[in-house]
Each structure stands twice: as C-alpha cells, then as structure tokens.
Amino acid sequence: MLKGTVRITDRTDAEVAESLKKRDLNLAVSEARRVCELLGRDPTIVELTIFNTMWSEHCSYKSSRRILGEMLPTKAANVVMGPGEDAGVVRFAKAADGDWHCLVIAHESHNHPSQLLPVEGAATGIGGIVRDVYCMGAEVVGVLDPLRFGDPHGENAGQTISIARGVVDGIAQYGNALGVPNLGGDVVFDEGYDDNCLVNVVAVGTVMESKILRSRVPEEAKNRPYKIILVGKPTDDSGFGGAAFASEDLSSEEDANRGAVQVPDPFLKRVLSVANRKVLEQASERGFSIGFKDLGAGGISCVTSELADAGGFGVRLDLDQVNVAAGHFPAAVIACSETQERYAMAVPEEFVGDVLKIYNEEFDLPHIYHGAGAFVVGDVTVEKKYTIVSQGEIVCEAPINVITTGISYDRAKKSRRLLFKEPAGQDDRSLKEDLLKVISSVNIASKGHLFRHYDSEVQGRAVLRPGEADAGVIAPVPGIAAGIALSVDGNPRYGTIDPYQGGALAVIEAARNVAAVGAEPWTITDCLNYGNPEIEEVFWEFYEGVRGVGDACRGIGLISHEGDPLPVVSGNVSFYNQGESGKAIPPSPIIACAGVVKDYSRSRSIGFKESGNTVYYVGEPLDELGGSEYYKVIYGELGANVPEADFVRERNQIRAVIEMHDLGWVRACHDTGQGGMITALAEMLVAARTGSSVGLTIDIDEFSNTGLSAEKILFSETGGFVVELSAGIEREVLALCARVRVKLHKIGTLNSRSNLEAVSGDKRLAIWETEELRDAYINGCRGIFGIEKGE
Amino acid sequence: MATSFKGKVAIIQFPGVNCENETADAIRSVGLDADLFRWNEDPGLLEESLAVVLPGGFSYQDRIRAGVVAAKDTVMDALSDLASAGHPLLGICNGAQVLVESGFIPGIHWERVDLALAPNIMEDREGYYCNWVYLRNEGSSCRWTRLFLEEEVIPVPIAHAEGRFVTRDEDLLEQMIKNGQIVLRYCTDRGDIDSAFPVNPNGSMENIAGICNREGNVLAMMPHPERASWLRQVPEDICGIWGKKRFQAAGDFSRMEDEGPGRRFFASLLEKGPVSASSGCSGQAKEGGR
C-alpha cells in the first residue's frame, strides 16, 4: 500500500462521503469509487487531490464538453489551433518571407474569486489569462474585461459598488504593472448579479506561425533525455483547491474559501516574461525543441501530466525539488496548489544549465523575489506513467492517461416556461426626457472614468482606445497596415427572455462592433457563465445559449471565405454562478470577437466629424424592444419581443459596412444595439471633437414604412449601423447597399448647430443641445466610478 | 556575450520596467540604434553609449516608493559619473521617479533628494490616471527639448499614480525657474497654463511635467514621448496642429506612420554639439496664464 492511502473500497457510501468532506474534497462518492476502479486500488491522498481538481467542472468540462463539441464550429480557413490548447490561434497577415502573423486569444472567468476578494480575484484573472497566451510563445498585446455587477441602486448597492471598484482596481493594478494595455471591455449592471458578479478576462497576443510553442513534450524526447523545469514563484498553499472552489456554489462559508484565491504578482510576471522570451529565443537559435505550459488550475500535477501526456510521454516528479515558500506543506498541497506566476517546461538535458542560468543568474530571480527561481523537478519518461515521489516515497503512480482522461456527464435539461409580456406603453411620454434618462442610465452612460484607471497606451500600439469606438483597434505589427479590432459583448436581458437569442445576439453584437471599425469578424472566444448545471432548467439555458452561439457563428461566417464559419478558437465554461439565495445569474454567454481590418488608418472613432457629411442608417428598426435599455429605464420592465437573430441580414449588413470602410467612405460608424438608434446618434454627437460644431436632425417619417411609433423607431434594439459618410456619394452608397441586399435609410446631413433634433415631418418631437446630452452621458455613472470633468 | 553600446542609446532594464521595447522602437524611428541594458550587466559598458534612457514601468515593483529602490542600484553610480560628465540621460515616468529619487533632478545639489513625485491629486478620483495631455515647451537649454519651438504645444499621454512634482523648499522652485530647469508644463490645447484638473492632470506644482538639471543634459519627464512617436498613436480628438494632422491622415496608412509629436525628444539626440546657451528660459519667467 502506498503512503497516505485513503480507504474507500471497503467503506460505505456514508463513510466515504464523510472522509471526502473531512479532507475538503468536492469529489462525489461515485467519483471517488471511479478513481479506485481506474487505479485498481485505493488512492493516496495526493492522487485523490489530483482527481479532485482534474475532475472539477473547471478543468474537466464534465457537464459541457459534449455539447460544446456538437454545437460550436472550430475549424475555418484561418484557424491554426482551436480549443484544446491554452489559447486559440488564427492567422491574420502574411509576412514577406511567407510566414504568417498570428493572433492568439484566450478567454476565462474569475467570477467566484472576484466576488470574495475583488481586487485579488480580478488581478489573478488577468494574471492567469495572460499566461495562457504567453505560453503559446506569443507576446501579449492586450487584455479586455467583460464585467457584470449587481444593481448599483438596488438592495445590494453598497456591496455591488464596492465589488465593482475593487475589480477595476485589481485589473488596473495587474495589467498596468505587467505592461499590457487594456483595449476594451464592457460593464453591465443587473440585479441578477447581486450575489454573484462576473469577471471575465480576455487576453490577446501575436506570434509568427513558425514560432508557436506547443504545450507538449516534443517528439525529440524519444531520442534524448528531457527534464522538467519549474520556474517562478515559490509554491505555497495559496489557491489550494482553487479550481474545485470555482466549481462550487458560493456559500455562506465564504471566509473558509478565501485561501482558495491566489495571490497575484505582476512584477514577477513581468520579469518572468522577459526572461522567458530570452529562453525561447535561445532554444530557437540552437534548434532545441521544448514544451512550455503555464501553471493554472491544478498546479504542478495538472501541468506536468498534461504536458507529458499531450506528447505521448510519462513523467517522474520529485516534489522535494520544488522551491517552496517558508513553511511545511503536505505533498498534496505542493502537487496541487495554484500558486500564481509559475511556468513549467520540458527541455533537453543539455539545455538545462543555460535555462537555469538565464532565470537564476541573468535575471537573478532568487534575489529580486524571495524564494523565486527555476529548478529541475523531474524527468520525462518514455514509459507513459505518472509518478510523484515525495521524501523518497511514491505518493502517486498511475498510467498517465488515467490522470488526464477526465470524466463526462450527460446532464438532463428541461425548458423553463416563463411568460413575458410587452409593457402597456404611455401616450404622454416626453421623448426629450426619455432619451436623457436612457443615456444617463448606468448601462449606457460613459465608462470613461473607469477606463482611465487602465493603461491603454503601453506598448504604443493603440489606434482606437476603450470608449473611442465600438471596438478597440491596435496596429499590432510595425510597418504593416493590418489592424486588429477587439470587442466583447453579451446582454443578460436578452438571455433572460430567450437563452437561445441571448447566445446568438452576443456573437452578433460582438461581430457588429468590430465591423463598425471596418474589421472583418475573424474569430470569437466564448465564456459561458451559467448557474448550477445539475438543475435541469439551468442546463437547458446553457444548452440553448451554446446552440445560439454555434448557429450565429455558422450564420455570420467569415465574410471573405464563403462557406466557412466564424470559428470559436478558445473559451471557457463557468457554472455554479449563484449566490446564497440559490438564484442563478441570468444566462450570460459572453463573447469576445477579434476582427482584422485591412488598413487600420480607415478605422474611425464614433464621434461625428464634419458638417456637410451625410448620415445613414444601415438596417431597419423592428418592434424588438424586449430586453431593451428603454423598457428597463422607462417602464422598469423586460418586455417580450427580444431581437431575433437574422443571420443573413446580419452577414449582409456587416459586409456592407466593411466595404464602406474599404472604399474610404466612412467618417464615423456606430452600431445601434443597446439604446437603439437615437442613443447611438446622441453618443456620436457627444463624442465629436471638443470645439467642433456638428448637429443633426432626424425625421422619423423616413421610417414610416415600419409602421412603428416614434419611441419604437428610436429605441428599438434591432441591429443596425449609423454611418457618417463623406458627402456627394449618395448614388454609390445606394448601389452598394442594393448589391449586398441591405436596407438603407438616409437620416440627414450633419449641420453645425451642436444639437440633436427629432422631427416628424413639420412637427418637432424633441431637441437636445449637445451639452445637455454630454452632461447626462458623462454623469450617469457618478457614484459608481466617480465622474470625470472635461470628457 | 555582452552587447556593445558603442554609438547606441542604452535603455536601462530594471526588473519591473515595462516600456523598454517601445522606447527602443521610438529611438530607432529617428535613425539611431538602441539596445536594452539589463540592470546587473557591467556598468562599464554604458560609457561608450550615445545616451541613456530610463524607461517607464514599475522598477522593483514600486517597493517602498516608486523609483527609490532603483535609485539605490549600483548602476546608478555609473550613471552619476556619466551624467556629471554631460552624458545625455532621460527618465520617462518611472525613470523620472528614479532620477528624482537619486537626486540627479533637480541636481542643484548633486545626488541630494530635493524633490518628490507625490501621489496624484485629481478631481473626484485618485490613484492611477491614463490620458492624453498637452505640454508646453518652456524654451530652456535642455538637451532633450531643443528641437521644439518655444511655447510649442506637444500632445502626449501620461499614465501614472505618482506624478506630482513637489518640494517644500520655495527657494528651490525659484532657483529651478531661474536656471531654466522647468522645461515642460501641462497646458491647455492652446498652450495656456491652467492649474485645474484635467489640464493639470496630477496637481503638480506650477503644472510641472518635466524638469532638467542645470546643465540641461538630464531630463525627468512624467509623460511618455515614446507613446506619441507615430501619428497613428495620436487620438482622433486631439486638438491643435497635431489633431489636424491626424484628421487629415485618416485613411492614409503611410501618413499615419509619419512622426508623432513626441518623437522629437529622441530626435534631439541627432543634433550635435552643446545646446546654445542663448535659448535661455524666457518662457519660464512669464506670469501669464497661471
């Protein structure tokens, strides 16, 4: 019997349950028995802890894997690597030497840790996601952060605001110190997140295709000895059980879980990333193949087993060689703790000395950070066995695929039948007041104050920054015109009414945002945030959401590759998002879309530019205000008529807008999602350059063919685009829209009156001075993130 | 293995700095060569360099206080000798904090710490602040600003939490003014000095954004010229001549790749010979607009 064996086989279910609980393990009794079956004996405590992590929802995708595999398209002409790696990779521009510039993207959630410890939770979220991109051999060129908080004016206002501020602080502290620019994100406030905030994080990097690193022990290890090196922060017990914790309900035992939140250190990460680059360069120069992977969930055991198994090898680890922080830690903690800022690599023995020298002498890790360094902790073995030795004794020994194979469940689903109805409506509404209320609502109003906590300028690549346009744009490679546009999206209210549309519209909206700066939607990542999958209605919401995401990806597709889907190359599933009350969050599929713009110089901010230019509406408003900002703010209701995804229409509109950019016509462009057309116009006016005098009159009679009331025309959330185009090209614009079969309405010509006016024929409906719109828009989030003058 | 810095600009890579690569790119964009100098390499290598830049970031994690640990690093001894001998030395953001903490700036009493870069004071917010600001060149004898016209307005971004130049010694401020050491001040897009946020983005005394030593070869500036070295980096809503250039370049990739407002800090190194003493500090003594 191995040291530390836990008796299961000859124990009753009740005894096993008790024994698991005593050891803080979340494995089900049936799962513990399955471990015994796989091993052919009772497991050691180290083994049981490893399975506890590897079989957590977070690591194993045990509830979601099958559905994701069936529903989501992952292959397309541009894909180099899809899901399964630490990050997805797509090509985006061909280099002169025939090699390809590639975009690397990863997306994760850090919801539970951020609810408990907002600053640390959000910071380690950034820390974890950038590692996933670094370990593909890429340079990280940006992060984005989709955030969902509770109602800042509701019952939980105090806690909500304090969490929101903490999360922003954590993101800023980590990203700013690491030197990775924040390129965007979105913030949605909804009472559905009162007990459970969502902190999603997206990281984006660039790498040449020929330099992509694999998270696997290379083939070459068959021919010569390979060693496993662990580098970074000394291992401690922080984040012990983190993955398992992320897969639990948030309970009132919150305090007991705080130890499961890791401790972030962007300083060490920065130094490591500089040193890593040198190691990778040397390996490449000297022709050594290496395997490289970051330590995330499950710590050392997870990373080493996956690294070796992916290459078809085994590993023999000696835990006594691991650099640990002061104190004594049991073998299970060293093997599984989720201490931040660590990487593992498999390198040929003859390269080991140089690698250790770079980390430990040149970059002097042991002196600049107490206890940090690079150490050889094990050997790659040709025999496909996973062995861990601690103090001279074997504490884990199993065929390596037993450790990594995972587990899968078929969850039951049941559709929920909720009745939604449209608000009754009121005849005596004041359009003037209504728009001011909508643009000052927390979900529409300026987040400028928040963005300025983040360094968006570092690395010098930013062309359009957060808040300047629907998507952030960078010029990723010096000297080439191709730009990368990035956006995140997901409206919880759509998903509440209809989880399928919630998924589809998140993809559509994210894709529209990148199209609004002239970029072709090129790939997406999805972070699927839901409640407890063991509840049938919740699992149905999840199923419907994924179905919507998949359909939208196939429906929109790659514009330049007819027949290819918009590929999903990376993603994450986060279940058990519910608070003490037991109420699940609204279905929250959050999509990040990366687009490629042929020439970044054509990407413009949303601000109106010059009087004399013509403003068009691409698309047509329908009676689709279900889940809209207007219903919520004005009637306090959800409504029922959620926008219905029409993939052909969306694809055509996106194509039309990209072509307008390519032709050099676009002076400003903004998509009309949340808040509808009039909100988009107001935002474009407010964003006009200080000192420039532009104004616009919109005649709703132009939309009389829709048969809708003024409020529905102006606030409908049916997708469309407002575009400001150079003057004198009306005929060409009409021809283009006819050719790609999109509806087009001319709104008017920009005047120089610094106001926005809505009329119906001769009758004025409302007029707003730009200054009053600006005040409403800028002050809306006062009290949450504060207010910024002069914006 | 050690790199030779002969004829190159050396960028000091303390652990935790994070702007070294784009700073090198900006220097290269003016036709000069630049290379990174890892903090624990042989400081003797720096003697042959053309100039030395301390880039932005969080050297040594801002432990104790931003810049203070790096200021005690042994490489600073070598930089002290070089700077005293007239070698050009530029500190950007965290680099400026290092220069203040090491007493190179203001440097009237060499290596005596007479100034501080204190936490920002802003309206309705605290901590880190990232935004574009306008600087006014105060027309001094500084080695790094000599390509700018007197009172020229230069848009550049800032990104810091501790950028407020302060001193308790009022005589010192007067001396610095008299010496023409205050070379860059935050201003409106028209070049007016307004002490209110956000024109003065951090509450710095006298709107100071950059200070050089008396001799003009060492400059500490909080804004980031390397992030304003290409026209594409300039936001669309910037006012003035640079805003106009940016507006006109939209849709034209090659023009967007032209120089931005911050590049001349680096291009100043191309100018040979000492700075003309006659350029003086006339902009400095003006009371107007304060």
Image (cartoon, rainbow, N blue to C red):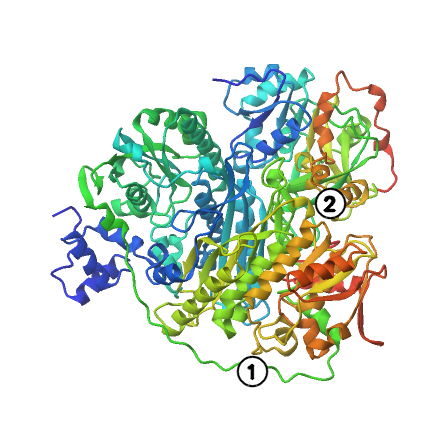
The answer to which of A66 and A528 lies nearer the viewer is: A66
Q: Does residue A137 appear anywhere in the picture?
A: yes
Dividing the picture into quarters, in which one does residue B51 lie?
top right
Instruction: Tell me the SS state at disc 2.
Output: loop
> Where does residue A532 sit, x and y in percent of width and height?
38, 68
The reply, left or right, for residue A24 in relation to residue B121 is left
The answer to which of B248 and A108 lies nearer the viewer is: B248
Task: Say which residue label 2 marks.
Answer: B250
Labels 1, 2: one chain: no
Question: Which image quarter is the C terminus of chain A in?
Answer: bottom right
The reply, left or right, for residue A766 in relation to residue A514 is right
The answer to which of A760 and B169 lies nearer the viewer is: A760
Residue occupying image coordinates x 56% and y 62% = A508
Chain ID for label 2? Answer: B
> Where does residue B213 sit, x and y in percent of width and height?
72, 25
> Badge 1: how crowded within 10 Å, few (<14), some, or many (20+)?
few
Residue occupying image coordinates x 71% and y 22% = B269
Select label 1 or label 2 by which is in front: 2
Dividing the picture into quarters, in which one does residue A20 lie?
bottom left
Chain ID for label 1? Answer: A
Q: Is residue A578 above or below residue A40?
A: below
Task: Say which residue label 1 marks.
Answer: A421
The reply, left or right, for residue A471 in relation to residue A304 is right
Amino acid type of the residue tagged 2 in the rendering: Ala
Q: Does residue B106 appear anywhere in the picture?
A: no
Instruction: Tell me the SS state at disc 1.
Output: loop
Amino acid type of the residue tagged 1 in the rendering: Lys
> Where does residue A464 sit, x and y in percent of width and height?
66, 48
**Distance between the alpha carbons at the discs numbered 1 and 2:** 47 Å
Q: Is residue B175 above or below residue A402?
A: above
> Where does residue A210 sit, x and y in percent of width and height?
45, 35
Q: Which numbered circle lies on residue A279?
A: none
